[in-house]
Image: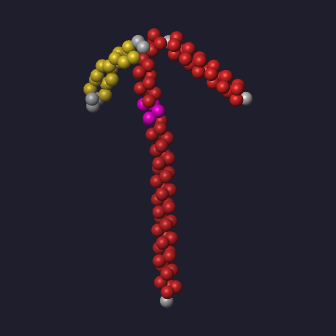
Amino acid sequence: MRLAKLIVTLIIIALIGWFIYDNMAAWTSPVAFKFALPLLGASAWSLQVYLLMLLSAIVGFAVGALMVLKPYLGARRKLALERKEKKEAATAEVTETQPAQAS
C-alpha cells in the first residue's frame, strides 16, 4: 500500500511539473494592471502572471487563516475568563469559610 501511495504521489508531482514546464511561456509573460484604492490613489503595475498568482495565494491564505483564528482565539479568551472566574469564586469561598472555622 505504501508503494502504491508513493507511485501515485510521484505521478501527481510529475504531472504538476509537466504542467508548469509546458506553460512557462504564459506564466512569465508580464501583465499590466491598475491597483486602484480610494485612499492611496491609482497606481499601475506590471508583474508576471506567476507573481500575481503567488501574491493572490498568499493573501488568500492569510485572510483564510485570520478568519479561522478569530473564533478560536475568541473561544480561548472566554475559556480563560471562565477559569479566572472559577478560581476567584473558589478563593472567595475559602476565605469565607476560614474565619468560621477559626472561631
In the image, is 99 to the left or to the right of 1? left
Percent across and percent down for residue 77 are 46, 53
**Main SS of residues in magenta:** helix
Residue occupying the point 52% across, 11% down:
22
The magenta stretch spans residue 8: no
Q: Quadrant of the N terminus?
A: top right
Above or below, 103 against 38 in this view is below
In the image, is 38 to the left or to the right of 56? left
User: In the picture, residue 62 is in which quadrant?
Assistant: top left
Say how many tags the image has: 0
Viewer-proximal residue, 36 or 99? 99
Percent across and percent down for residue 9 are 63, 24
Query: Which residue is outermost to the right?
Result: 1
Give the magenta-colored segment's residue range.
59-63
Percent across and percent down for residue 36 are 31, 24
Residue occupying the point 42% across, 14% down:
28
Percent across and percent down for residue 74 are 47, 50
Residue occupying the point 68% across, 27% down:
5
| Type of colouring | secondary structure
Query: Which residue is outermost to the bottom?
Result: 103
Above or below, 100 against 84 in this view is below
Residue occupying the point 49% across, 46% down:
71
Viewer-proximal residue, 79 or 6? 6
User: In the picture, residue 14 is in which quadrant?
Assistant: top right
